[in-house]
Image (cartoon, rainbow, N blue to C red):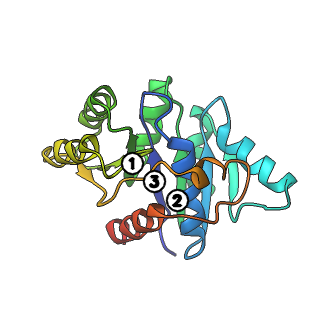
Amino acid sequence: MTQTKIIVLANTKGGSGKTTSTICIATALAGQVDVEVWDSDPQASATTWADSAEEAGETLPFSVEIVNHSRLNQLRQKTTADYVVIDTPPGDPRMIDAAIAIADLVILPTASTAMDLERTIQTAATIPAEILRVALITRTNKQTRSYRDAMELLQSHEDLATFSTGITNREAIHHSYGFRPRIFHEYSTVTDEILEILQ
C-alpha cells in the first residue's frame, strides 16, 4: 500500500491564493491519482467552494474534509488517498505548524510584492529542514520586472525551491470559484512538478 503524500499550502498572509491553488492543484491531481482536500481554515473557503460546485452540478473530483488541530492526525491515520492537499488559515500559527509537521511538501503561495516575498521567506525559514518547501508566485503578470525580480530573489535562497512558473492573474481562474476548474493554465505545470518532486 502506497503511503499518502501530504501537501500543505501555507502563508501567514491572507490573499496569497492558497485556496484557489489548493482547489486547482487538487483538481489537476485528481485526473491522475486519488486525492482529498482538507480544509483547516475557519473561513472554510475550500468547503464553500466544494458546496457551491455541487449545487451547480459540477461536483469536484475529490472530497473536502473540514479539519481542526485535534482531527488532523486522526484523519492522517484514516485516509487511504494517494495525496492529501491541506488549505491552511493565514492567522493561526498553531494550525499552520500542525499541518506543516505532517507535510511531505509545503507550497508557499505568494504575490510578487516585496512585502509578500519577505513574509514568504520568513515562513520558509521556520519550516523544519527535512520538509520540502517550494514557493509559488500567484496572481502575477510574467511580463513585468517585478515578476522577474521575485523569481530571482526566491531562487537565490538555497533552502527554498521555486516552481518553474508563476500563476498568471487570469479572469478564468478568478471566475472558477464555486465551480469545477476546467482551465488550469500554469497549474498543470505546477502539478507535474509536484508529482515529480514527490514520486
The residue tagged 3 is 7
Disc 1 residue crowd, few under 14, some 14–19, many 20+, Cα 10 Å:
many
The residue tagged 1 is 107
Residue lying at 57% horizontally and 60% vertically, measured from the top left: 26
Residue lying at 66% horizontally and 53% vertically, measured from the top left: 176
Q: Are marks 3 and 1 in contact (CB under 8 Å)?
A: yes
Q: Amino acid at mark 3?
A: Ile
Q: Give me the C-alpha separation between circle 2 and circle 1.
A: 11 Å
Q: Amino acid at mark 1?
A: Ile
Q: Are marks 2 and 3 in contact (CB under 8 Å)?
A: yes
* Mark closer to the chain start, 2 or 3: 3
Q: Is residue 80 visible?
A: no
Residue lying at 24% horizontally and 52% vertically, measured from the top left: 161
* Mark closer to the chain start, 3 or 1: 3
The residue tagged 2 is 25
| Rendered location of residue 45, percent (x, y) | 66, 38
